[in-house]
């Protein structure tokens, strides 16, 4: 009798060890990590991402005087979080940089607009999860070739839950259009549809850099700095957007470091100048007047947006930027 009891006890003990080890193992898997994460309510119901195309960090926050970005540095960043030394760790071209921001994956995408991203974007995941039509998410860009951000070549997702797009000349997905027109059209779209998830691209910094026009390049940094402030003012003066919108201002890539290749004229390689950018985030859930020195990159943008708007983005490789939340 005693022998049998001991045997049963041992069996029980063995079973508990197996069960315990099994649980321990599953807790370390990715899935359980998400489940452990507490659900948090956010005030943010709308997110607008403004991409100022290709300023070099040495002419933005890398210049301690911030002389070309007075609004970003003195008006906008103090109302939110500035991440210095924010990185593009993938291909430092326009379509690849924007793709990394929207899909949470680094991928070398052809830069002429002929190649769609491999992975679905935050727009598709958002519209799918919330069961919303295409007017709820928009890609608005001065560069027509950025209409690739509205779709994917992933066979399960291609053509599904695609956002609205207004890119390039007359929004037709071709050519380049002046930022003045893009900004005018963006304002019309924001006021008419009040979309919850929007990306806006402005091109003039990049175009003037490529044309080797130093003064115009600097002026373009000032112009887009002005537009960033106008966008924040539009948000805070709009009864729907006010106090429930997060604005993120960042770049798709930088430009070559001074003295490397042809300097500010071009970009696209691994130099520090091409990789380094800024991230400014303002909204009801973000800290105020907070500066973070590095540690984050483009993939983290969509992961953080998915957290705030409560949708799943299973293919992202980004991390939620926990440090920026209140
Ligand atoms: Zn670019
Ligand atoms: Zn470079």
Image (cartoon, rainbow, N blue to C red):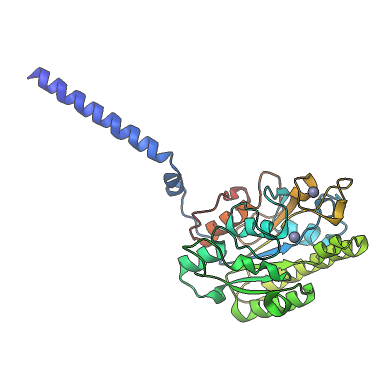
Of residue 149 and residue 115, the one placed in the foreground of this image is 115
Q: Is residue 8 above or below residue 121?
A: above
Most foreground residue, 292 or 122: 122
Q: Look at 76% across and 77% down and name the residue there.
A: 181
Q: Quadrant of residue 6?
A: top left
Residue at x 29% of width, y 31% of height? 18
Q: Answer yes or no: is residue 125 visible.
A: yes
Where on the picture, by quarter, is residue 230? bottom right
Q: Nearer the viewer, residue 76 or 138?
A: 138
Res 245 visible:
no
Residue that extends furthest to the top in the rendered view of this protein: 3
The spot of residue 150 in percent (x, y) is: 59, 68
Give how far across and how far down residue 151 sits, in percent. Answer: 57, 67
Quadrant placement of the N terminus: top left
Q: Is residue 118 left or right of residue 54?
A: left
Q: Is residue 236 above or below residue 265?
A: below
Residue at 24% x, 31% y is 15
Q: Does residue 139 sit above or below 323 in this rendering?
A: below
Left or right of residue 276: residue 123: left
- Residue lying farthest to the left in this orientation: 1
Q: Is residue 74 left or right of residue 126?
A: right
Q: What count of labels does the image hold?
A: 0
């Amino acid at each position: 009798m005693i022998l049998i009891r001991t045997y049963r006890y041992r069996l029980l003990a063995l079973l508990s060890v197996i069960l315990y080890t099994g649980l321990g193992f599953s807790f370390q898997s990715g899935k359980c990590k998400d489940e452990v994460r507490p659900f948090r309510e956010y005030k943010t119901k709308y997110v607008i991402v403004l991409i100022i195309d290709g300023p070099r960090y040495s002419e933005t926050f890398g210049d301690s005087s911030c002389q070309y970005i007075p609004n970003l540095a003195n008006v906008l960043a103090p109302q939110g979080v500035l991440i210095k030394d924010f990185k593009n760790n993938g291909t430092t071209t326009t379509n690849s940089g924007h793709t990394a921001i929207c899909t949470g994956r680094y991928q070398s995408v052809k830069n002429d607009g002929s190649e769609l991203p491999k992975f679905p974007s935050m727009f598709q995941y958002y519209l799918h999860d919330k069961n919303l039509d295409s007017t709820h998410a928009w890609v608005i860009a001065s560069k027509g070739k950025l209409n690739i951000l509205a779709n994917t070549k992933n066979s399960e997702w291609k053509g599904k839950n695609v956002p609205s797009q207004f890119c390039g000349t007359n929004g037709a997905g071709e050519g380049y259009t002046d930022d003045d027109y893009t900004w005018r059209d963006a304002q019309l779209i924001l006021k008419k549809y009040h979309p919850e998830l929007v990306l806006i691209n402005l091109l003039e910094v990049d175009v003037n850099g490529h044309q080797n026009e130093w003064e115009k390049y600097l002026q373009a940094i000032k112009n887009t700095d002005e537009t960033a402030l106008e966008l924040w003012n539009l948000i805070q003066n709009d009864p729907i957007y006010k106090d429930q919108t997060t604005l993120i201002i960042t770049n798709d890539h930088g430009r070559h470091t001074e003295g490397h290749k042809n300097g500010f004229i071009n970009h696209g390689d691994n130099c520090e100048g091409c990789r380094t950018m800024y991230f400014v985030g303002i909204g009801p859930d973000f800290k105020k007047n907070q500066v973070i020195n590095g540690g984050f990159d483009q993939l983290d943008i969509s992961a953080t947006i998915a957290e705030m708007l409560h949708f799943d983005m299973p293919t992202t490789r980004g991390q939620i930027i926990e440090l920026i939340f209140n």
